[in-house]
Amino acid sequence: MKIFNTLTRRKEEFIPLEPGKVKMYVCGPTVYNFIHIGNARPMIVFDTVRRYFEYKGYEVNYVSNFTDVDDKIIKKAMEEGVESEVISRRYIEECKKDMAGMNVKPATVHPQATQEIEGMREMIQTLIDKGHAYAAADGTVYFRTGSFENYGKLSHKNLDELQSGFREIKVTGEEGKEDPSDFVLWKPKKEGEPYWDSAWCQGRPGWHIECSVMAKKYLGEQIDIHAGGEDLIFPHHENEIAQSEAANDKPFATYWMHNAFLNIDTNGHVQKMSKSLGNFFTVREISERYDLQVLRFFMLSAHYRSPLNFSADLMEASKNGLDRILTAAERLRDAGNIAIQRESVDGEEAMLPKEQLHEKAAWELASKFEKAMEDDFNTADAIAAVFELVKLSNSTVSDDSSKAYIDFMKKLLEKLCDVLGIFTERKAEALDEEIEAMIAARQQARKAKNFALADEIRGKLLEMGIVLEDTREGVKWKRV
Ligand code: AMP
Ligand code: ZN
């Protein structure tokens, strides 16, 4: 299996640290709002990487954090007049719902920065003791980039150039730095901000130290794969390497994987989708128009290292493509049911000689799929192989096919789709009449002052993707 490693800028054979196991860390979102579909790209891409490893029989320890202490979270909390924790807890829950909708598996562990402060204080102290970090007069602790020989090895930047570049940009409040390229490990609290005690000052950790510490705690000092969006290469991942390798005296991650951006074309101007540019769609907004499986399929239709432009046309094309697969799976299920009935009368059916030939052709397509995935997770080519399989299935499976052949085809299609995280069954749409009946039952429960039952019905509707709104004209509902 070959992986493109940002560190060496080459595709390299994957050799795990421990045979049969993969230790993988993926930088997760900062939770101050609903995630947008740009944030969804690394989630979907690296979940697919994980699924492929699992398909190959590896045991994957997959760690992905939530950054739950950050300026943006604090700002939002102040705007709403609540504690930061209220904001982060809310958006972690919302993010998990979006992940479930996109069929992104929960990580083995989803650590939260605020729960790992002790580990951060320890690593910072180790770095100070080893001469890799220092505390300034105001209690800010900085990493001494000049003390780490390989600083710049991931982003292929040269420290001298970096230092002169930084010298041009003078940032106020950083007067305590020995060098402009040094970065923050711990910073003093400001009025009204969450803080923790430390030997240096009451304050909070810098962003980069969080990931070094959480990776170490849940995966160990050395890991196989570290991943995230390409904007994280510098400074975030470069700084993680400096911290982890300086503290642990071991190479941190063997392979560094980075997904390219999801862009959006606004009036002929192609830009990265981002919160700050305001040109984003949240996953939740997309879920109002499409099953999130479509979004997942769209993301995987391009190679993860290629930029991808979001557009309504491409989403429609993905919807149609996905539909072709789901229709083929449905036909297989129907044909399977007919074969079951026949078998119950005529006895077990073996595969016919011509079906054995088709079976061979199907296995060849499965190996085409694997070959694509082995080549740095080329999901675009892997999907092309799935389409070929769909074509083979459509042209060879009929109501007369043997049950053995139908079962084989169905299982193979399901297995390959599962690697991509695609369900082969259409979600049953709740019928309007069913919803109306439940709403009427809820109204009656409310009239009878049985509020527990009314709430229960509301909860059930929510699970079905229906939200209720009590208006002056009565209860209105919509699908989310
Ligand atoms: P953030 O919450 O900004 O730290 O981002 C969480 C993850 O989403 C990181 O891995 C980012 O690199 C990634 N990301 C943010 N915007 C995009 C985008 N437009 N396309 C692809 N990945 C993105
Ligand atoms: Zn990180």
Image (tube, rainbow, N blue to C red):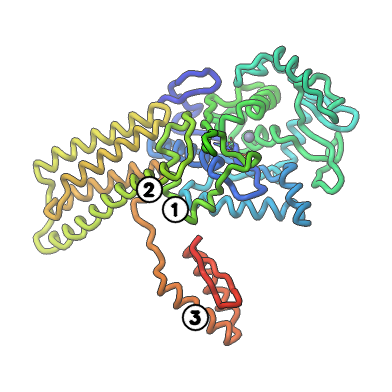
> Upstream in the sequence, badge 2 or badge 3?
2
Mark 2 vs mark 3, CA separation in Å: 35 Å
Picture coordinates of residue 360 (x, y %)? 18, 36
Look at the image and tell me in which quarter the N terminus lies: top left
As drawn, 322 above or below 476: above
Q: In which quadrant of this rendering is ligand 1 seen?
A: top right
**Residue 441: image tag:** 3
Q: Residues within 10 Å of mark 1 (few under 14, many from 20)?
A: some
Q: As drawn, which residue projects farthest toward the bottom?
A: 448
Q: Contact, CB < 8 Å: mark 2 with mark 3?
A: no
Seen from the viewer's position, the closer of residues 377 and 387 is 387
As drawn, 88 above or below 179: below
**Mark 1 CB within 8 Å of ligand 1:** no
Q: Is residue 96 left or right of residue 70?
A: left
Label 2 is placed on what type of residue? Answer: Lys
Q: Secondary structure at mark 3?
A: helix
Q: Secondary structure at mark 2?
A: helix
Query: Do we see residue 132 in this rendering?
Result: no
Label 3 is placed on what type of residue? Answer: Ala
Mark 3 vs mark 1, CA separation in Å: 29 Å
Q: Residues within 10 Å of mark 3 (few under 14, many from 20)?
A: some
> Upstream in the sequence, badge 3 or badge 1?
1
Closer to the eye: label 3 or 1: 1
Mark 2 vs mark 1, CA separation in Å: 8 Å
**Residue 157: image tag:** none
